[in-house]
Amino acid sequence: MNRRTYLKAAAAGALPGAVVTMAAAARPGIQLHVDLTFDLTREKEMLNTFEQTFKPAASKQPGYVDVLLLKLRSTVMGKPPGDANYRFVLIFESEELRQKWIRLRLTRRYGRQSSSI
């Protein structure tokens, strides 16, 4: 990894709301950020499902770079994201590969009709 890439990754990690992992900084890609609200009484269950089910499934996909689930604690700049308490970040090498994975998941879940989505 060259110095410039390392510095960009370090700077991004130092700023709240900026999410760049070393893997993501090493190659260009697309990031999807979604603010979510979870019932905190079921937080442990949600985190377990994310780590044990979703993350391993996503990591097997072509173009996968990283997936993160960040707990939002405070707002440093701007308006807070409503009542959201987590931020989901999905990073793929390209939007086309991310969309291909989404179509595959929809087809598996709902059958052939969603393959045209």
Image: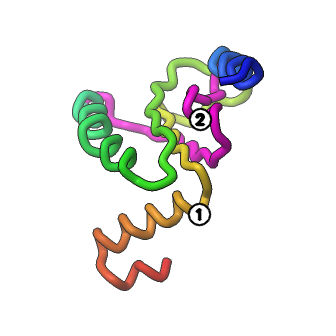
Residue 53 appears in the figure: yes
- Location of residue 82 (image quadrant): top right
In the structure shown, which secondary structural element does the residue marked by tag 1 occupy?
Answer: helix
Q: Is residue 36 magenta?
A: yes
- Tell me: 51 left or right of 62: left
> Camera-side residue: 9 or 85?
9
Residue 97 sits above or below residue 85 on the image: below
The residue that disc 2 covers is 24
- Tell me: 27 left or right of 40: right
Q: Residue at x 63, y 27 (%)?
A: 17
What amino acid type is highlighted by mark number 2? Ala
Crowd rating for badge 2 (residues with CA inside 10 Å; few <14, some 14–19, many 20+): many
In the structure shown, which secondary structural element does the residue marked by tag 2 occupy?
Answer: helix
**Which percent across, then down, holds residue 60?**
36, 49
Residue 112, label in figure: none
Q: Is residue 61 magenta?
A: no
Q: Earlier in the sequence, mark 2 or mark 1?
A: 2
Crowd rating for badge 1 (residues with CA inside 10 Å; few <14, some 14–19, many 20+): few
Rounded to the nearest angstrom, the CA distance separating label 2 from label 1 is 17 Å
The residue sitting at the right extreme is: 4
Q: Which residues are magenta?
A: 15-41
Residue 64 sits above or below residue 14 on the image: below
**Which percent across, then down, holds residue 67?**
46, 39
The residue that disc 1 covers is 96
**Which percent across, then down, holds residue 59?**
38, 45
**Which percent across, then down, holds residue 31?**
60, 45
Q: Residue at x 44, y 69 (%)?
A: 103
Residue 77 appears in the figure: no
Q: Residue at x 30, y 34 (%)?
A: 51
- Tell me: 45 left or right of 83: left
